[in-house]
Image: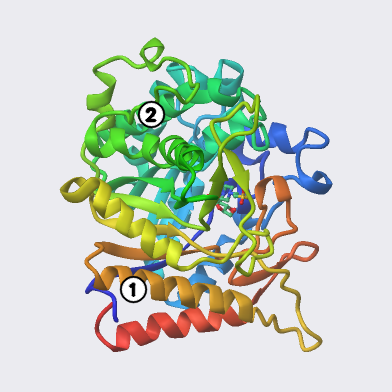
Amino acid sequence: MGVPEGFRWGVATAAYQIEGAVGEDGRGPSTWDVFSHTPGRVRDGHTGDVACDHYHRWPEDVALMAGLGVDAYRFSIAWPRVQPSGGGPVNRAGLDFYDRLVDGLLDAGIMPAATLYHWDLPQPLEEAGGWMVRDTAHRFAEFAYLAAERLADRVGMWITLNEPAVVMAYGYALGVFAPGRTLMLDALPTAHHQLLAHGLATTALRARGAREVGLTNHYSPVWAQDAASPDDARAASAFDTLMNRLFTDPVLHGAYPDVTGLGVPDMSAFVRPADLTVIASPVDFLGVNYYQPTRVRAPSEGGALPFDLVDITEYPRTGMGWPIVPDGLASMLRTLRDQYGEALPPLYITENGAAFPDAPGPDGTVDDTPRIAFLDAHIAAMRAAIGEGADVRGYFAWSLLDNFEWAEGYHPRFGLVHVDFATQARTPKRSYAWFRDLIADDRRRGTG
Ligand code: GBH
């Protein structure tokens, strides 16, 4: 099964995970700078201070992408480079970097796909309440406007937010990601304020001539531990509501799912009726990030959440310990169609990939056969879903480079290209050649 005409093959990265150069050209601090510099937050005290030094080495990285033959590159624009204090006038030097990158990509025949928020909130905005306060949504729309003013003539796709569910859950509820707050279910307003930010930014981007605009969500099919247990089924539905549907229903249906009985605060305290109209502004596509399914069971006595997570142990796992379930991608694509029908816009797989403990062999090459198997199986699942009618327009592998994997630092390696962080030497892994050949094959067959 091929892919449709015009299908976009790509790779993805995010600013804080690869750029480094955190003090250059007027960049301000982000929540991730503060978090990674707080002892105990990131494994072995790793920070994004240098990362892949992509800020200086981007021409080499664009050449690596050109060698892959990708149609598109998904990167993120660091808000603290554009507005160092989260508001006010544009820092031109910060935007100059993306201006150069975008021109470099176009010269290489690669379509730039820009994400505006991949978790690096300007620290001053966090100190004013971060995503818990409504004002952050308005600040984000200003940032979107400034970015588009400079880049919309050349950026092919705009992704407002990356995985707002993960920001809410890991950043504000559980505190394992920046900003490290442990509000548990009281983190719910961060969902609404991010979605409002998405809606306001969509309008701002279009006002500045942005072509395709959409949102990227993390999607995980949810399995009840015991399908015959009503309590486990209720827990699965609670997880699905809070992590999947909460971030999709308002965008595509203009309404929040019913959250009564889940223990969350009353939404009328922070949702104004007109907000839903803003949030439901039409999008050109929906970005789907898929890594793995989630298994839950009924919460234990006195648990703070309406579900307990259970390890999935009957599948092989990646270096992150995540189960490898390619059919989860196909089933998620099916579920989205069933749930949203005609309201579902075209889809892009904006992230999919895996970490493995890749190391160069004695001859210097990196044999990452498990990654090839992972990508091959997931792309096959995507193709099967397309064959059943899923409207998927592109697939971005996570990631081009080994990079700063958030709270796990530089230990997990997600790249198609190996990075030696001591020397910054890049070495394409076997999966790089494999992905290059896959893209070339599709093109030869005239289907992609
Ligand atoms: C994405 O998030 C990010 O967008 C990207 O920046 C990141 O590098 C990439 O994934 C790889 O992590 O341990 O079984 O309880 C993924 C969000 C949230 C998905 C945590 C896996 C853990 C499930 N992740 N989740 S489990």
The percent position of residue 91, horizontal first and vertical second, equals 50, 33
The circle on residue 287 is none
The percent position of residue 180, horizontal first and vertical second, equals 67, 30
Residue extending farthest to the left is 342
Q: Quadrant of residue 251?
A: top left
Residue drawn at 64 percent across, 66 percent down: 317
For the residue pair 315 and 248, the one nearer the viewer reads as 315
The percent position of residue 439, horizontal first and vertical second, equals 40, 80
Residue drawn at 42 percent across, 73 percent down: 379
Q: Quadrant of residue 6?
A: bottom left
Q: Gap in Å between the C-alphas at discs 2 and 1?
A: 33 Å
Q: Is 445 drawn above or below residue 255 in the view shown?
A: below
Residue drawn at 52 percent across, 58 percent down: 291
Q: Earlier in the sequence, mark 2 or mark 1?
A: 2
Three-letter amino acid code at disc 2? Ala
Q: Quadrant of residue 396?
A: bottom left
Three-letter amino acid code at disc 1? Arg
Mark 2, Cα crowd under 10 Å, few <14 / some 14-19 / many 20+, is many
Picture quarter with the N terminus: bottom left
Mark yes or no: residue 316 visible.
yes
Q: Is mark 1 within 8 Å of ligand 1?
A: no
Q: Which residue is mark 1?
A: 383
